[in-house]
Amino acid sequence: MRQRAADISAWAGLDESINLPLRTYSSRMVARLAFAIATDIVSDLILIDEVLSVGDAEFQVKSKLKMKELISSNSAAVLVTHDLKAVKEMAQKALWIDHGRAMKYGDVDSVVDAYLNA
């Protein structure tokens, strides 16, 4: 991890503040750092919870590209989000959950349509 720290902080855009205590980071800085750490290596499964909507537009684009890169490398990605545009851009299947109850599972368009029509 120490060897990859410079690349991780650069990717997260935190070079200037990487040596500050984590408690001084904003919630967006923490999310950027967490995403950069979680996606630094290719793994079999990655769980992403709403992080694609965090940060400025540049970070959001960079994050989506990174997710697509991971998916194309045969990693399984579970994206938990309310961002229907991101779901349509990246997902192959979708699961709509409402208050812990599975409402619909299947192809992205039919699940998103059902969600929007509910």
Image: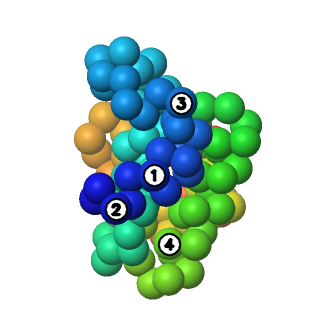
Query: Does the image show residue 80?
Result: no
Q: What residue type is labelled 3?
A: Glu
Quadrant in the picture for the N terminus: bottom left
For numbered disc 1, what is the local secondary structure?
helix
Q: How far apart are marks 1 and 3 (CA)?
A: 11 Å
Q: Which residue was labeled with disc 1?
A: 6
Q: What residue type is labelled 2?
A: Gln
Q: Which residue was labeled with disc 4?
A: 70
Q: Residues within 10 Å of mark 2 (few under 14, many from 20)?
A: few
Which color scheme did the rendering employ for the protein? rainbow
Number of the label disc, if any, that sits on residue 3 = 2
Q: Which amino acid does label 4 sit on?
A: Leu
Horizontal and vertical percent position of residue 118: 56, 38
Number of the label disc, if any, that sits on residue 16 = 3
Q: Residues within 10 Å of mark 1 (few under 14, many from 20)?
A: some
Horizontal and vertical percent position of residue 62: 65, 52
Q: How far apart are marks 3 and 2 (CA)?
A: 18 Å
The residue located at (39%, 74%) in the rendering is 42
